[in-house]
Structure formats: C-alpha cells, structure tokens
Amino acid sequence: MNKIVIIDEELCIGCGACVSLCPKKILYIDKKSGKCKVTDESRCDRLRGCVKICPVDALKII
Ligand code: SF4
Ligand code: SF4
C-alpha cells in the first residue's frame, strides 16, 4: 500500500491537535512513544486539515 500520511516523529510533540481534528479518526497518539501515528490511511480524505493545524509541520499528505 502506498503511503499517504507521512508523520515526522522527530518533529511531532504529541500535542494531539491533529488527532482531535481528523474527521476520519485515523490519527492517534502512540502511548509508548508519545508521537502521532496513523491507522488506516486508505481512509484519509487528503483535505490536509491535520497539516494545517500541526504547530510543528510534522505532517505531510501525499
Ligand atoms: S488529511 Fe484529513 S483525513 Fe487525512 S489524516 Fe489529515 S485530517 Fe485525517
Ligand atoms: S498536530 Fe503535529 S505535533 Fe501535534 S500530535 Fe499531530 S503531528 Fe504531532
């Protein structure tokens, strides 16, 4: 499966803003790492709400 949601875990501060915003509920904060991760990215709407809300530009939609 092709990647759609790219998360830069070095940049992510685990704020959860993208998780709350995502209408498809495919983003979550991994408890172990404290970083954002994606579940079923094939459901991504590619509207980039997460990209716009992320304070550290850690997300990319391709
Ligand atoms: S582009 Fe939209 S659906 Fe896809 S991960 Fe971001 S907020 Fe969720
Ligand atoms: S909005 Fe950005 S910094 Fe916050 S959890 Fe999502 S990817 Fe990480």
Image (cartoon, grey):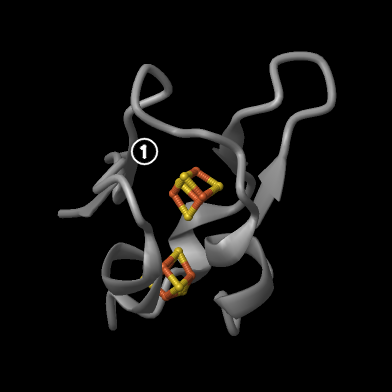
x, y percentage for residue 50? 40, 68
- Residue 26 appears in the picture as rendered: no
Q: Is residue 45 placed above or below 26 in the rendered structure? A: below
Give whichever of 42, 8 is nearer the camera.
8
Name the quarter where the N terminus is drawn: top left
Name the quarter where the C terminus is drawn: bottom left
Give whichever of 19, 55 is nearer the camera.
55
* Residue depicted at 64% across the width and 62% down the height: 19
- Left/right placement of residue 60 relative to residue 9 reads left
How many numbered marks have been drawn onto this rendered protein structure? 1
Which corner quadrant of the image does residue 32 belong to? top right
Q: Which residue is mark 1?
A: 1
Helix, strand or loop for disc 1: loop
Which corner quadrant of the image does residue 21 belong to? bottom right
Which corner quadrant of the image does residue 17 belong to? bottom right
* Residue depicted at 46% across the width and 60% down the height: 42
x, y percentage for residue 43? 51, 69
